[in-house]
Amino acid sequence: MGGMHLLVRALVEEMAGRGVPHRVLTMAPPGVPRDLAIARNVTVHARRLPVLPIPSQLEGYFGLVGAWAKGSLLWVLRNRRRLRREISLVHAHCDGSGSAPFYGWLIARALGVPLVAQIHSSRFLSQHPTTLWERVTDPAAKWAERFTVRNAAAVLMLTEKARTEMRDAAALDPRRVHRLAYLASDRFAEGDTEERRTEIRRRFGLDTGQPVVLYVGRIAAEKGVEFFVEAAAELRRRGRNCRFLVAGDGPTRQEIEKLAEDRGVADRITITGFLPHELIPSVMALSQLVVLPSRYEELGIVILECMSMRRPIVAHDVNGVHKLIEHGRTGLLVPPFDTPAMADAIEALLDDPELRERIAETAAPLPSAKYSLTTAADQLTDIYRELGVCV
């Protein structure tokens, strides 16, 4: 699961634990039950139309997100009479595709209930097309997101900056736009155990004594993993003996592996493939620092996770990242897509243990102080109540 999916799951489980029943419409791989009660008050429904197995850097398969959105809408329409009695509100989580917010609005209309649109990544405000297909569909995706937020009962943004920008750009009533940001667990750091560290060292050969520079996340165009590889190549040219660990998987993995071969750093870079999220705290604990090379990032949940684990981070200064990282105090910011600057920042942290410790200590209190899941659920409860939903 990516960062957005972890946040959705965490919020659903927290709200369900407070007695708010949820039906979650999502996708699932073959062999997974189409309807599954995963916890008290949480039932997951996996619905989508068939798609051709044409690989896509954005979706895994071409048209997959649209097929899920259409399949979800059809399921709602077929069960509309029953669902009208059960559903009080639709909460759509939006990733910048355009499909999720618009079909969320259609589903809310079909059921005659309010829509809450939670924007995890905004095509309208901040995303820039990275492929030909994105450039072709960009106007429609932006229109769909703008239309949806203008017709939603409440809009949730990850940062105060994004909240203000969406309010102004879409001409929204300020009372309908809220900031809602949180870490997927208030106890993230407790997931680190010596047993898990031992497993990770064994699986990925991290017992060589070399410093470990880490990337955590999907291997996808928008995540900029190629800049991580370029920084690894630059550091090798400078004579640095480091291991570079990519903890994740994704649609551009083959391109990243080829780039590592072309740059002569395939022997320095290990790609773990998918890792269960419960292993990530221990992966971070085994690293000296973490790099976030994203092309755009509304917030960057991995930043909060690094802070919880007391690991310094080097990040591209894009979108909402500088709202979390104060350069030199809670992390290091570098100009976007500047490989020498990223290599310089990595070297600065590797060469100065006191700087690493100082940044880690300064940043550590931030997640629990400002991004508590419990506090976010309290805020969401108030928003639901304002919309007339009894929770």
Image: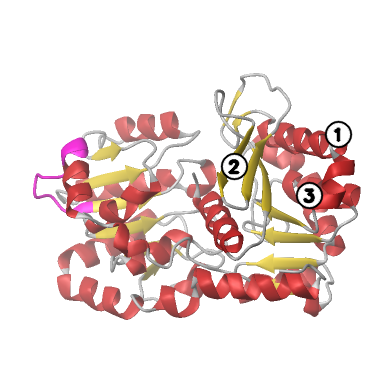
Give coordinates of residue 134: x percent, y percent: 68, 40
Sequence order check, earlier mark of 3 and 2: 2
Relative side of 33 to 383, left or right: left
Against 196, residue 360 (above or below) is: below
Tell me, for residue 193, which label it has, or none. Answer: none
Q: Secondary structure at mark 3?
A: helix
Q: Earlier in the sequence, mark 1 or mark 3?
A: 1
Amino acid tagged 1? Arg
Which amino acid is tagged 3?
Answer: Gly
Which residue position is annotated with label 2? 37
Say whether residue 247 is left or right of residue 321. left
Q: Which residues are magenta?
A: 202-212
Image quarter (top left, top right, bottom left or bottom right) of the C terminus:
bottom right
Judged by its main secondary structure, the magenta piece is: loop
List x then y, in percent, for residue 348: 23, 67
Structural crowding at the residue carrying mark 2, measured as other residues with C-alpha within 10 Å and reported as few (<14), some (14–19) or many (≥20)? few
Does any portion of residue 164 appear in the rendered image?
no
- Amino acid at the residue labelled 2: Ala
How would you rate the neighbour count of disc 1 (Cα within 10 Å): few for under 14, some for 14-19, many for 20 or more?
few
Say how many tags the image has.
3
The secondary structure type at the circle numbered 2 is strand
**Res. 33 in view:** yes
Mark 3 neighbour density, 10 Å: few (under 14) some (14–19) many (20 or more) = many
Q: Is residue 322 left or right of residue 288?
A: right
* Image height of 34 relative to 19, above or below: above
Residue identifier under label 3: 104
Residue 358: x and y in percent read 24, 78
Q: Which mark is residue 78?
A: 1
